[in-house]
Image (spheres, helix red, strand yellow):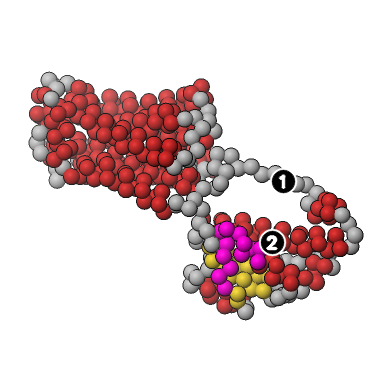
Amino acid sequence: MICTREARSMASRPLYLFGMILAPLFTTLFFLTLMGEGLPKDLPIAVVDNDNSQVSRRVVRQLDAFKQTEVLMHSANFSEARRAMQEGKVYAIFYIPENLEKDVLASRQPKISFYLNNSYLIAGSLLYRDLRTISVLGSAAVAKEFRTARGQTEEQAMIELQPVAVDTHLLGNPLSNYAVYLCNLIIPGVYNILIMLLTIYALGMELKQNTAHVLLRLSKNNMFVGLFAKMLPHTLVYFAVITLIDVILYEYMQFPCNSGLVPMLADSYMLVLASQAMSIFLFGLLPIMRLSLSAASLISVVSLSISGFSFPVSEMHYVLQCWSNVFPLRHFFLLYVDQALNGLGFAYTWHNYLALSLFLFLPFFVIRRLKDVYLNFKYVP
């Protein structure tokens, strides 16, 4: 009876349709489309070439050949390039000094400078990698040709230019695909926000419409049974939507999932349950709907920053490191890294499942207070 009653309530309110189904699916489509290329390409830069030699022109051509970099303008002086960067037309300036070719051929160390606009974090970091690479390898390529012209073999020249060869392999996300880096966490994070807000909204509407006594009567004054039956239709819809999202990410988009789809589904289901449990706990503490909605909004939004995927938790203040563990999204992120990226089994991830399971006990701390609120509390608009 309670489940049927709640299902009818959900069907009669467009807000549930929007928050439970349309908003998360739109978020998924939006971010997957926004980052469909994986990495930003052809980021515009300005080049100031004061040498204008064969060597400098070759360096500029090699830089322009990089996928992430496009030489949009050749500036006659640094002031013009700086003005273009301040106006947002370019993200970086590559400055080639005079006598670059002469210094290279004379075995001196010319100084190539580059300036970045790090207000754009992703663009700045990608361009820094390309500009630093061309600064080192461009001069080295010219020096290699100079040494071979003097009679050295290619192997001898490379030993002098690069005595230690570095073989780099990126794990987890070898293509540096920003969709893999962000979508797997932002999309569940947004859904976590929606789940918490809609759960509190559903509980608060019983007070607003003065129907809490009906819920208690149907559950025979058993608040636990009433809560379980009321939340069950919500949970089933959340499970169905999060399943569809995971299938899109890991089956259709082929994002890294070394442990298989089933462990990631278990991770997602635990996030849904933990988010609902925390919402019930917050509403029990703050039975005024606008206050509990504000608290849920604050907690769920902060969890996006403190969970560790935007800034390492290990580099935060010790208090914040401890505080991060009270957010379900933090343990979801750790499970995602261990399972999808590293392919670890349950023997290595059980403690994070246990942490998410502990959130399920939060409603028991407020269930008696929540029953008293439903019996005696009057709605405060």
Q: Is residue 289 left or right of residue 106?
A: left
In the image, residue 256 above or below residue 138: above
Give residue 285's quadrant in the image. Answer: top left
In the image, residue 64 above or below residue 341: below
Nearest the viewer among 53 and 184 is 53
Q: What residue type is labelled 1?
A: Val
* Picture quarter with the C terminus: top left
Find numbered disc 1 in the image and state the secondary structure of the residue it sits on: loop
* Picture quarter with the N terminus: top left
Q: What stretch is highlighted in magenta?
A: 61-73
Give residue 74's quadrant in the image. Answer: bottom right
Mark-to-mark CA distance, 2 and 1: 17 Å
The residue under label 2 is 135
Nearest the viewer among 210 and 68 is 68
Q: Which amino acid does label 2 sit on?
A: Ser
The residue under label 1 is 166
In the image, residue 112 above or below residue 345: below
Find numbered disc 2 in the image and state the secondary structure of the residue it sits on: helix
Residue 114 part of the magenta-drawn span: no
Give residue 16's quadrant in the image. Answer: top left
In percent of width and height, residue 76 lies at 62, 79
